[in-house]
Image: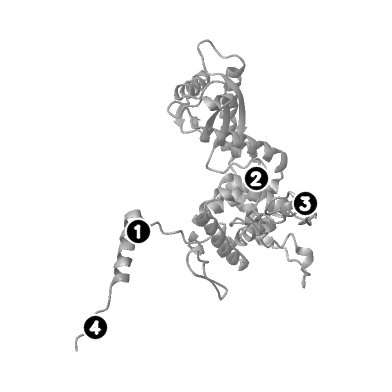
Amino acid sequence: MRPKSMGRRGRSSGGPLFAGIRPPMQWRSPAFVPHLPFDFIMCENAFKRVKPVTEDAELMEMLIKKNQDLTPSATEQAAVLNIVTKVSSVLDNLTIAPPAGFDVGIEEVRQVGSHKKGTMMAGKPEADLVVVLKTLPTTEAIAMLGNKVVESITDTNETLQMIPTPSGCDIKGPGATARIHIATISSNMSKLDSTLHLPAKVMSRSFAAIRHARWFEENASNSTIKVLIRVLKYVQTRFEGLSALNPWIIDLLSHYAVMHNPQRTALSIHVAFRRSLSLLASGFFLPRSAGIIDPCEGSNTRVHTSLNLEQQDQLCFTAQTLLRILAHNGHMKILGFEGDPSIVTTMSVWDGVVVTPSEKAYEPPVEVKEGEEETKEGQDGVEEGMEVQPQQQ
């Protein structure tokens, strides 16, 4: 007789021994779901007002006055424009027709930084230029370039000085400074020698400055954004807790606070300033927050990931204290017209309301040295092995 079949998946039908048994599922890391901090501007329609909006005319007036104080004088602006024009003219001539014996090849010259963006601060008459070289960026080549610029401009009876810097060189004049940052073409990056050339990390920052200047010119030409940038730069230098905000983060935060709203129209300067502090206080730059995606970098990089955890926490709790002070009309001390920066570190009273500074939430892990760890483990072992001797009666 023909034996009965054991089924489609049975061994007698030619199937594998463990046919029908599912293999174990592979573990997958959970998808990153960014947290969106509360932003009243974005959900204003969901909260019906019980009274009309009050125009904070005094805050707006003080912000405009602060911007006027932070704007460079006409003398400073003329001095910066003068040195930038002369340095750019010399670099253009060296690019098109380099003189005999000048072995530094220049690919292009770009203006970057606050002078290019129109956000230069008073007391800092400086302009930045990025020079992309065709040749390798050796120390000798950078010195030759800087000295050639000084030599060419000195012919016009103006005394200048070339000062080497970690990223290139400074051309210092009597009333302003042109900072030259050096980079090189991409085909040279693989030929760099750390003992002879500028570090690749330094030159990558110069290329990033070019991208930042181009993006700013195309997207952030609104005058309110520039005013907010100047004010936030001042507040960043006034309060140590905000020192982690670099110029590029301030640029993007100002653009977001002014332009990112349902109507896609520029907000007033006093609304944008209050919103900036509110965003920081709500955890906009904390871990797992949506934050702001860097428009000049790939793979959805968020700008606040360049900050460490302690800096992110410090930004948040400092902004929380400043926002509470601003709610009690303390803008005069925030903007530096009155008082000192201690308002974010000591308790203050505003019309009978006590404002206590927020405390840090992040505690850095304690680093235990290898020798100390072994000693501690040995002590624990001794304690665990000890026996209590009975007392003799």
Which one is earlier in the sequence, the residue at label 2 or at label 1? 2
Q: How many labels does the image show?
A: 4
Q: Is there CB contact under 8 Å for labels 4 and 3?
A: no
Which one is earlier in the sequence, the residue at label 3 or at label 2? 3
Q: Which of labels 3 and 1 is toward the front?
A: 1
In the depicted view, which residue is nearer to us: 285 or 142?
285
Q: Can residue 86 be seen in this view?
A: no
Type of amino acid under label 4: Pro
Q: Quadrant of residue 114?
A: top right
Which one is earlier in the sequence, the residue at label 3 or at label 1? 3
The residue pinned by badge 4 equals: 390
What's the residue at 68%, 39% (across, down)?
215
**Position above or below: 22 against 187:** below
What's the residue at 58%, 66% (across, down)?
325
**Position above or below: 55 against 23:** below
The residue pinned by badge 1 equals: 373
In the depicted view, which residue is nearer to us: 64 or 96?
96
Q: Is there CB contact under 8 Å for labels 4 and 1?
A: no
Q: In which quarter of the image is residue 5?
A: bottom right
Residue 265: give its label.
Answer: 3
Q: Which of labels 4 and 1 is toward the front?
A: 4
Side of 104 relative to 65 (left or right): left
Residue 294: give its label.
Answer: 2
Tell me the SS state at disc 2.
loop
What x and y, as percent, mark residue 305?
58, 50
Q: In which quarter of the image is residue 86?
A: top right
Side of 292 relative to 382 (left or right): right
